Amino acid sequence: MEHVHLAAEEDDLYSGYNDYNPTFDSEELDNDAGFQQAVRTSHGRRPPMTAKFPGTAIGGRALGTSFGVESSFGSESRLLKSRMPMASSMGRPMTGAVQDGAARPMTAVRAAGYSSAMTRGSTFDPLGQSKGPAPPLEGKSEDTPDEKVKILEKKVNDLIEESCLAHGHGDLQLSLDRAKEAGRKERALVRQREQSGNADHINLDLTYSVLFNLATQYANNDMYAEALNTYQVIVKNKMFSNAGRLKVNMANIHFKQKNYPKAIKLYRMALDQISNSHKEMRIKIMQNIGVVFIRMGQYSDAITSFEHIMSECPNIKTGFNLILCYYAIGDRERMKKAFQKLICVPLGIDEEDKYIPPNDDTHANLVIEAIKNDKLHQMERERKALAEKFIMTSAKLIAPAIEATFAAGFDWCVDMVKSSQYVELANDLEINKAITYLRQRDFNQVGAVETLKTFEKKDSRVKSAAATNLSFLYFLEKDYDQADRYADLAMTADRYNPAALINKGNTVFVKKDYEKAAEFYKEALRNDSSCTEALYNLGLTYKRLGRLEESLDCFLKLHAILRNSAQVMWQLANLFEMLEDPHQAIEWLMQLITVTPTDPQVLAKLGELYDSEGDKSQAFQYYQESFRYFPSNIDVIEWLGAYYIDTQFCEKAIQYFERATLIQPTQVKWQLMVASCYRRSGNYQKALETYKDIHRKFPENVECLRFLVRLCTDMGMKEVQDYATKLKKVEKMKEIREQRVKSAREGSTRGTRREGSASSEVDIKAVSHPEPKHSPLLDQGRDSGHSSHGTSAKGERLSAKMRALPGSNEPYEASSQRDIDASYVDPLGAPMERPKTAAKKRNEDDDFADEELGDDLLPE
């Protein structure tokens, strides 16, 4: 420490740095005896130590101890003159070792970072910033085999993912294309591995994924042969573990192809390859086997499978299928046992009470509010609804079979359900019991009405349903007072029941209070905007009120909901006809015949519209089609006969008038037209025979006798005098009869005048301006779609045409208007329109619509 100088305030801060201990003077080592002795001993000739750190002892650099004692290996003088610090014997660089060309002084002697070597051109750069930025990282070369393999694998995985996503979006063709492309890429990947010599490192999982996805997409696109071939490739490859399970998929394809024996074989092979530890998978396969046996009609084998499942792991679907099998073989007792097992199957869902929030716990209320409509709760509701559907269907199926009467069977099912976890279904079964009476058309059955009346004191939901059905029942029986009473009861129990509102509107409608009926239909629509019955009846109400545009708007909205409803299309066509737009009416009727191409009334209506437009050829085509499907429509027969007479084809008109004679044998005009057609076609003998036959059936017919007199005169027959005598007698009797009628009419007129003189002015006005009478039946229905004056006008046109058929030079063929226009009864009868009656829909089988509603829109 004697050579260590402390810097004083007046001394130079950098003085004394070049002073050093003479002990470390290398120039005096030659005269140092101790050093020379050490050099000559074995210690000086020992081999150099290997440096543990790079750069500490490289090449011929000297190694020294930690004390700075230098050793020489060959060139002692050069090393001694270098005066460079030595590395330690352990390879650690000394504190003042030279690194990167800059000499760092020893800490104990010099200041850090300062060296006299700075004068030789080096700069002070302790952080090494003078070297510039670090060189960029070397990129991976994609030309190597491993990189090519990784890129191909990524492409294959991406294609598989795209295929699955496309299938999820419903694009089956795109999913198949992506699956095929993935297969091609995977084969290219295998070839790439083989070329690089890595054939042993093939990714079997990737190959399995590609083949499985390809087979699945083939099956989704109904390419069953290709799917089976692809599955076969997977199953036969022993390198794929658990590939035998795919035989279930192969069996499913054979099931779709209705190759049931092959499907059962594959199901059983898959069942053998699945261990007992996978219990759920084995149960599903056995359930499929049972379903296949049902399709084959082998109910005993199906029962064996289903009974095993119900004993191991019972579920709702299997229990329902087991009941179907017992019903098919007619085993009453086992049906009862199976039904008892069905209602005891645990659903594995929580009670609904847990979703009722407590009033005092705010945090619990928030949690329940969040979970009461989540995916789990929705799944629980769906599972419960499915179980209730199966139980209701099973009860309705076996009730008539398990007891002597279906009522007793329903009672047994109700008792069983009341003692189970589905106690709320008992009321529904009771209502279904009444509905069964209705479906049997046994409206007078006391059980139906009494059963429904028992629910008047039940809770509001069941009470409303029963009252709705009773209202509908009484409406069908035209007991409108009772229908109105129960409609009010249903509305009181549940004001938001659209079916009850519709029934109430119907009872008001038949009382001709159309404005009030429209209000009820509107309220039903406000409660249920998808209620098609209310919308249909509202359109009919507007039609009756003469608000045709609003009625048209209702039916256009309904057509947007029910695109293929024939009733809606007919109403639209009828409305456009009433709005004097025949072209639009024809367009809607053309759409209608695409839905019901064999409806004779629609075809006849098209013919009528084309006839009014002057297109005889199109009218003839549609009238002919209508006659082909329904050859008993008098209007169609009359038009076709008149058409052939106008076109001078009287022979063809004969068959139509003969058919009219068969339909209306008491109407003489059809037989007269047949005889007239024979005479016009030149077959006078056949015409004479026809007139004689008419005379035998109608001996007082003046027209027939006139024709007989003229024909016999022209043909020179002897019977002409007899027919002339008869004609005179008939004409004389006719004159006497007309005089009597005239006298009676004059007498009644004089009596009316005498009575009228004593009547008040108000009474005279009432007679002078009578109120229009309206039919209590609704103006709906396809036959009554056109107005009554339209029908009469059509009849007048046809009758006038038939009256004008004889030529002007043949006065004897002219028929009196009374004879030709003799009234007749249409055997078809125009179905009257009636508002839609809404029955409470308990389930999909509880709709009450039937043919008695005429052309009302029938519920599904």
Image (cartoon, rainbow, N blue to C red):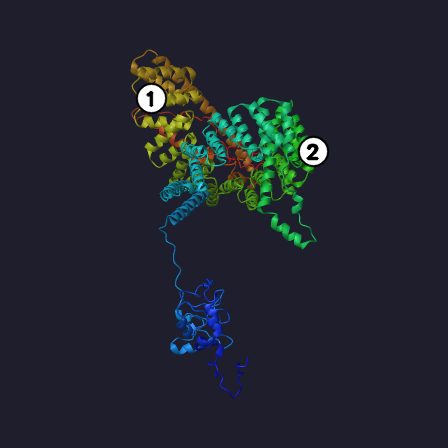
Q: Which is nearer the eye, 36 or 224?
A: 36
What's the amino acid at mark 1?
A: Cys
* Whole-percent x, y for residue 502 in the image: 57, 40
Q: Residue at x 39, y 34 (%)?
A: 606
Marks 2 and 1, the one that precedes in the sequence: 2
Residue lying farthest bottom? Answer: 10
Q: Which mark is residue 677?
A: 1
Q: Residue at x 39, y 54 (%)?
A: 140
Q: Which is nearer the eye, 485 or 394?
A: 394
What's the amino acid at mark 2?
A: Ser
Q: Is residue 532 left or right of residue 617?
A: right
Q: Is residue 395 left or right of residue 625?
A: right
Q: Secondary structure at mark 2?
A: loop
Residue 473 position by quadrant:
top right
Q: Residue at x 41, y 21 (%)?
A: 661
Q: Secondary structure at mark 1?
A: helix
Q: Which mark is residue 419?
A: 2
Q: Is residue 367 left or right of residue 265?
A: right
